[in-house]
Image (cartoon, grey):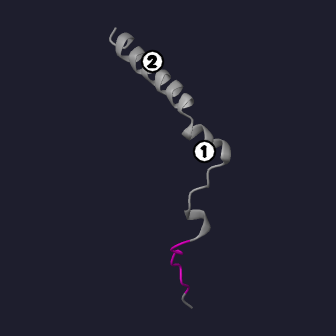
Amino acid sequence: METNNKPKAYYEESYPPVPTKSVKFWRSCMLWQFYRFIILNYKVMKIVAFGHN
């Protein structure tokens, strides 16, 4: 008795989740992107400035 254990090529679990409306909004909001850019730059500068003790 031989069983076929081949994985399915395309099944629902292999696709990424669809983003919600709020996720789409925050990804496309320029003010939020600018804010996150400033925060990221601050974190990098903090590492560069204070990381070489």
Three-letter amino acid code at disc 1?
Lys
Q: How many marks?
A: 2
Point out which mark residue 49 bears: none
Which quarter shows the C terminus? Answer: top left
Residue 8, magenta (yes or no): yes
Position of the N terminus by quadrant:
bottom right
Circle 1 residue: 24
Q: Is residue 40 above or below residue 6?
A: above
Q: Residues within 10 Å of mark 2 (few under 14, many from 20)?
A: few
- Identify the residue shown where x is 40% and y is 21%: 44
Q: What's the magenta region?
A: 3-10
| Residue 51: image location, x then y, percent | 37, 14
Callout 2, which amino acid?
A: Tyr
Callout 1 crowding tier (Cα within 10 Å): few <14, some 14–19, many ≥20: few
- The one nearer the camera, 5 or 41, is 41
Q: Which one is earlier in the sequence, the residue at label 2 or at label 1?
A: 1
Determine which quarter of the picture holds residue 32.
Answer: top right
Q: Secondary structure at mark 1?
A: helix
Q: Residue furthest bottom?
A: 1
The residue sitting at 45% across, 20% down in the picture is: 43
Find the residue positioned furthest to the front. Answer: 30
In the figure, is residue 13 to the left or right of 36? right
Reply yes or no: does residue 32 show up in magenta. Answer: no
Which residue in the structure is indicated by mark 2?
Answer: 42
The answer to whether 44 appears left or right of 10 in the picture is left
Q: Nearer the viewer, residue 26 or 1?
A: 26
Image coords of residue 50 (percent x, y): 38, 10
Toward the right, the furthest residue is 21
Image coordinates for residue 17, horizontal then vertical, percent = 61, 55
